Amino acid sequence: MISLRIVAQFAVATLLLASCASHKSTAVALKNGKPINPFAAGTYEHFKAEPTYPKTYAVWKNDALLAQTNSENSSLFISLAKQRGFLMNGDEVVLDYPICSGIPVRPTPTGTFYILEKIVEKRSNKYGHIYDATGAEVNNNADLSMDAVPEGGRFEGASMRYWMRLTHDGVGHHIGPVKRRPASHACVRGPSATMPVVYSKVKEGTRVIIE
């Protein structure tokens, strides 16, 4: 008679096999004890199966589809869990790039948004740098709602080039330092080489899903 322990072990093994089968992008082959990516180099499946994904700074691009993508057929998807942004053409990924979202005390909002405004040269009117009357920087991470500008000094808003506004209270998608963890004041930062491309493929009214 089969013991309950054997039955339990069989059940666990079955679940593990089912789990592995459901993640086709996982590299399981080994060479010298290291995983081998089973997909053809250059394919999106290969990119996602790399051990460094999604933490990598690398960008994946479908050149053929990018040429066919424009502001009429594009959308954006932002994954906060993966810290990745996706330029989409229908259901197909055109660009997969690293992003940097808001810190826990200033989280990036989730939901469905539509681009409200596009400005290439944009500076924050709240976050930035404070200089004293001599021109010396006294605060490189200033928040004007909390930090005062000294007499004779000035405030310079942080650069947010290729700005795409998502909310009326100041959240947008733009060029900024991309750390592989949440580090912004709620905005979604993207790489300087990638954001101009994304910017060129969207318009005011383009849908942006953040989850």
Image (spheres, rainbow, N blue to C red):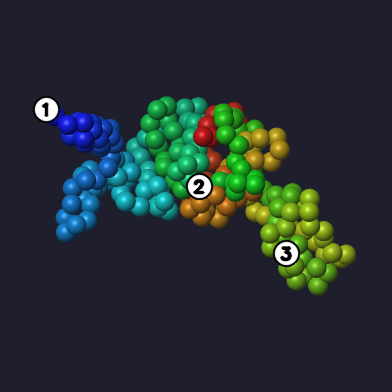
Q: Can you identify the residue that label 2 sits on?
A: 99
Q: Is residue 35 left or right of residue 59?
A: left
Residue closer to the observer: 196 or 21: 21
Q: Position of residue 5 (x, y in %)?
A: 21, 35
Return the mark for residue 139. 3
Q: Residue at x 72, y 64 (%)?
A: 139
The disc labelled 3 sits on which kind of residue?
Answer: Asn
| Residue on which the image places disc 1 | 1
**Mark 1: which secondary structure?**
loop
CB atoms of marks 2 and 1 within 8 Å: no
Q: Closer to the observer: label 1 or label 3?
A: 1
- Label whose residue precedes the other's in the sequence (1 or 3): 1
Rendered image quadrant of residue 66: top left
Outermost residue toward the left in this view: 1
Rendered view: 107 above or below 58: above
Residue 88 in the figure: left or right of residue 32: right
Residue 8 x, y percent position in the rendering: 23, 33
Instruction: Evaluate if marks 1 and 3 touch, with contact meaning CB atoms under 8 Å apart.
Output: no
When the figure is inspected, residue 171 is found, relative to residue 155, above or below; the finding is above
Q: Is residue 181 left or right of residue 170?
A: left
Q: Amino acid at mark 1?
A: Met
Residue 152 versus residue 193 in the image, above or below: below
Mark 2 falls on what kind of element? loop
Q: Position of residue 182 (x, y in %)?
A: 55, 49
Rate crowding at label 3 as few (under 14), some (14 to 19) or many (20 or more) other CA atoms within 10 Å: some
Instruction: Identify residue type, mark 2.
Output: Ile
Instruction: Return the residue nearer the eye: 84 or 105.
Output: 105
